[in-house]
């Protein structure tokens, strides 16, 4: 079963608020997939989300070239993947995914690997619109649906 939530964000501050509201609704461990065109806000959202768990501002780098960045925070380990450059499915399994899955995972460009991801996950899709706004679709799968009401109430505040 899947639930979907929709929101429109108009600027960088609203992206930050969205990451804050999502982080307040998550239970650990979590698995989040981020989709959208290049420049649609995936890495920016991930940066804000990781900093929410850090409790202090840390430098969150795009994992485009290293493919994975691991953030060992006080309360959680977050594995941030960018699979844009991965072309063959077997390449993905050389990235310690079996270890990462027991922690918190954020995956950018997840499309060809969705069959390998847990059934309990959140997918966030960013789509550019006119006037620099973005439509954001949040899909909750499996037990992740439990956060729906909590998240929806928080998103109404944006």
Image: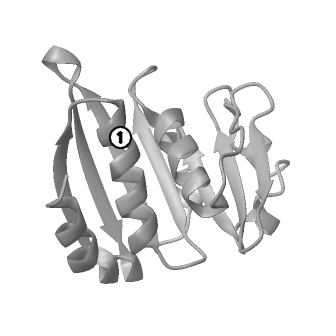
Percent x, y for residue 29?
A: 60, 76
| Residue at 57% over, 42% down | 47
Residue beneath label 1, please?
15
- Relative side of 59 to 21, left or right: right
Q: Secondary structure at mark 1?
A: helix
Q: Which quadrant of the structure image shows residue 30? A: bottom right
| Residue at 42% over, 31% down | 41
- Relative side of 80 to 34, left or right: right
- In front of the other: 86 or 44: 44
Residue furthest out toward the top: 131
* On screen, residue 52 above or below 91: below
| Residue at 19% over, 52% down | 158
At label 1, counting other C-alpha atoms closer than 10 Å, the crowd grade (few under 14, some 14-19, many 20 or more) is: many
Q: Which quarter of the rendering shows the N terminus? A: bottom left
Q: Which quadrant of the structure image shows residue 149? A: bottom left
- Relative side of 84 to 131, left or right: right
Q: Which quadrant of the structure image shows residue 151? A: bottom left
Percent x, y for residue 109?
A: 53, 37
* On screen, residue 26 above or below 90: below
- In front of the other: 93 or 50: 50
How does the figure colour the protein chain or chains?
one colour
Q: Is residue 1 visible?
A: no
Percent x, y for residue 131?
A: 15, 16
Percent x, y for residue 123?
A: 39, 55
Q: Is residue 71 visible?
A: yes
* On screen, residue 15 above or below 99: above
């Amino acid at each position: 079963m899947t639930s979907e939530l929709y929101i429109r964000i108009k600027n960088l501050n609203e992206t930050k608020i969205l990451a804050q509201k999502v982080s307040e609704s998550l239970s650990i461990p979590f698995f989040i997939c981020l989709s959208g065109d290049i420049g649609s806000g995936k890495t920016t959202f991930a940066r804000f989300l990781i900093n929410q768990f850090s409790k202090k501002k840390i430098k969150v780098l795009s994992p485009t070239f290293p493919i994975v960045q691991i953030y060992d925070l006080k309360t959680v380990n977050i594995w941030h993947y960018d699979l844009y450059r991965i072309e063959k499915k077997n390449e993905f399994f050389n990235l310690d995914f079996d270890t990462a899955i027991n922690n918190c995972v954020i995956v950018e460009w997840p499309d060809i690997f969705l069959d390998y991801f847990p059934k309990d996950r959140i997918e966030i899709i960013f789509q550019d619109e006119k006037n620099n706004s973005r439509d954001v679709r949040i899909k909750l799968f499996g037990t992740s649906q439990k956060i729906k009401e909590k998240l929806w109430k928080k998103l109404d505040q944006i």
